[in-house]
Each structure stands twice: as structure tokens, then as C-alpha cells.
Image (cartoon, grey):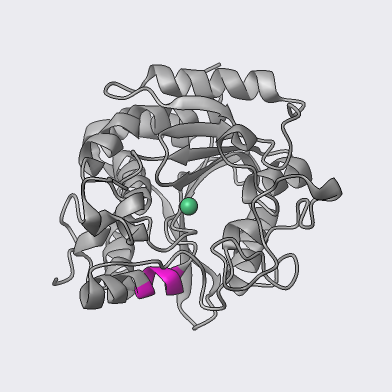
Amino acid sequence: MATTAGAAKARFKNFSGYKDFEDHFLALCENAKVPAEISKIGESVEGRAIWTVSLGDADPSAPGVLYSSLTHGHEFVAGDMCLDVLRWFLSPENRDASIEMLSRARAHFLPVANPDANERAHRELRKYGVSFARKNANGVDLNRNFPAHFYPEGGSPVMASNLPFTLVYRGEGPLSEPESRAFRDFVEKTPLRASLAIHSPGRFIGYPFCHTNAPCPHSKEMRAIADAMRARQPFFKYRVGSEFTYLPTSGDLDDWLYEEHGIFAFLLEVGKLGLRFEDPATWLNMYAWCNAPEAEKEIANNLDACVYFARWAAGLEK
Ligand SMILES: [Zn+2]
């Protein structure tokens, strides 16, 4: 499709590729009526730029909130969710509420954490109508590549693998990938109180730990925040719990953010699993698993919850 700058609801499935997303994202941010600082935080294996935008004029040392998505390149609905939260902040309709928050805490957006896989997903979908573009160009699952319990202790049943052909290959070592290092560098220079990593599918809101079933020291407070998000879901009430109860993982972004930096790191899994036994077209198509047809309603279902999350980070909600 043509560049969609200005279109209110451009969706990843309609972008022609990563470049088209970049054009849309940069135009959206450049036309923002609130202070918006666009940064290139690094480059992917294949040399694509990784972008963030930071909104607001809060004291840069005040802890902010980060929304990220497309760490797995084919989870288009997660990227659409992230962009809709950004659009909420930029919309003239929400100007007063947005400014109230942004004067207390900056809101940061990293909509495509894995640009090469996102580009590959577009290409595969165009060519074959299916996509498995989860991992980066080195075949690494970026959400298993962070330095938190990278090699899990005691043979716990944790989902990460040393085998490069698996979907959850952790890579040669912690932060072996340029995309994870860009994420790390951004976090290390950006004061953050809270992070919401948006993925799909699963209809789930989670928080650390990821690597063990033991409750994390802040699990009570985190559970209350997740419950408050759930209370703001109008159509579907998602399950809430520790990320281990959803999917045990090691080398996970959220354990690292929480344990290393004390950031309240949450996971939002948008939408139902799109694998349907009555529909063979969904059987061998990871894109279909992660982008169920009711995507628009699922995104609308989570918008208030995501805004609440920023209000909490800004100290406007308990
Ligand atoms: Zn994912």
C-alpha cells in the first residue's frame, strides 16, 4: 500500500513492509502536538533502524513507562495495539488526560523491537500467505536472549533452547543479538518505573517471575495492577498471573527488567489463539495463530487497560 501517514488506523497487515511502517511511525511522531523525541536506538542484524519515541516534557529523570512490541516479528496485532496506545496519547480528544500524565512521567514506545523478522513476515505473507517469522535474522528468539537466568538452574522445565532450529533458541550467549543490546542500551539510559511488553496471542496479563513458579517479591502489588487492567477490559476478561503460569521462560526480558532494574515489567498477550482445528489454513501458519480474526475488538478491549498502566506509572492511580 501507499504510505499511510495521517491515516488514523493504519495496520501492520496493510503495510507493504518495515519501511512502510517506518514512514508511518515517523510521520505520526513528527506531527505530534505534544513534545515527542524520536530516537534510533540501534540497528538490526540486517541493518534496519530500531526506533523509539518518547512523549512528554516530564523531568527526564522521573521514571517513565515503556510500551514495546514485535519482539516476535509476525505478531502484527501486538504492533497494532502498541501503535493504538501511542495514537491515544497523540489524539486531540485525549489532550487533557494525556498532558496530565505526560507532565509527570514520560511515555516511551518501541513498536518494532525485531525489524528484520517483521520485514520477513511481510515478505512471507505476500509470497506464501503464511509466516513463521518469530526470530531475528540470526534465528534467535530475542525474548530468550536477555541476561536473566539465561541457563536455567536445576533442569527446570523452562522454555528456551540451545538448538538453533527451535522456535525458542536463546542464542550463543546473553545479549548476543544487536536487537537485544539496543533494547538494553535504551533501558540503561531511560529511567523507567514500568514496562508493558505486548505480544500475541493468549488473552493474558502477566508479571515476573518467568523462570520459576515462586512469587516475586512484588507479586502482590503487581497482581493488583494486573487486576486493575483486567477490570478495564470491556469485552473479554483476560487471565491474570505470573508469567511462569502462562509459559515458563528463561532469558526473558521481563525477569531482566525486574531483577536487574527494579522495573515493574508486565506482559500483555493480545487476542485468542488463532489455531482452529476446523480451519486447515490455520494449521501450519504461525501468523494465523498469533493474529486471530477478531483483532480489532481485542485491541479495543485493551486500550483503557494500557492507558491505566501509564496512569499508574505516573502516580495518578494506585
Ligand atoms: Zn511473542
Q: Is residue 117 magenta?
A: yes
Q: Nearer the viewer, residue 292 or 2?
A: 292
> Is residue 314 visible in this depiction of the protein?
no
Q: Answer left or right for 141 relative to 130.
A: right
Q: Nearer the viewer, residue 265 or 96?
A: 265
Residue 37 vertical placement versus 137 (above, below)? above
Specify the quadrant that holds the N terminus: bottom left
For image coordinates 36% across by 74% down, the residue present is 119
Q: x, y (%) of residue 298?
A: 28, 36
Q: Residue furthest bottom?
A: 46
Which secondary structure type mostly characterizes the magenta part of the structure?
A: helix
Q: Is residue 293 magenta?
A: no
> Is residue 22 visible in this depiction of the protein?
yes
Q: x, y (%) of residue 305?
A: 40, 28
Residue 150 vertical placement versus 135 (above, below)? above
Residue 65 vertical placement versus 186 (above, below)? above
Q: x, y (%) of residue 223?
A: 59, 21
Q: Nearer the viewer, residue 236 or 277?
A: 277
For image coordinates 27% across by 59% down, the residue present is 12
For image coordinates 58% across by 41% down, the residue present is 247
Picture quadrant where residue 297 is located: top left
Specify the quadrant that holds the C terminus: top right
Picture quadrant where residue 92 is located: top left
Picture quadrant where residue 214 is located: top right
Q: x, y (%) of residue 157?
A: 71, 45
Q: Which residues are magenta?
A: 115-120
Q: Answer left or right for 172 relative to 307.
A: right
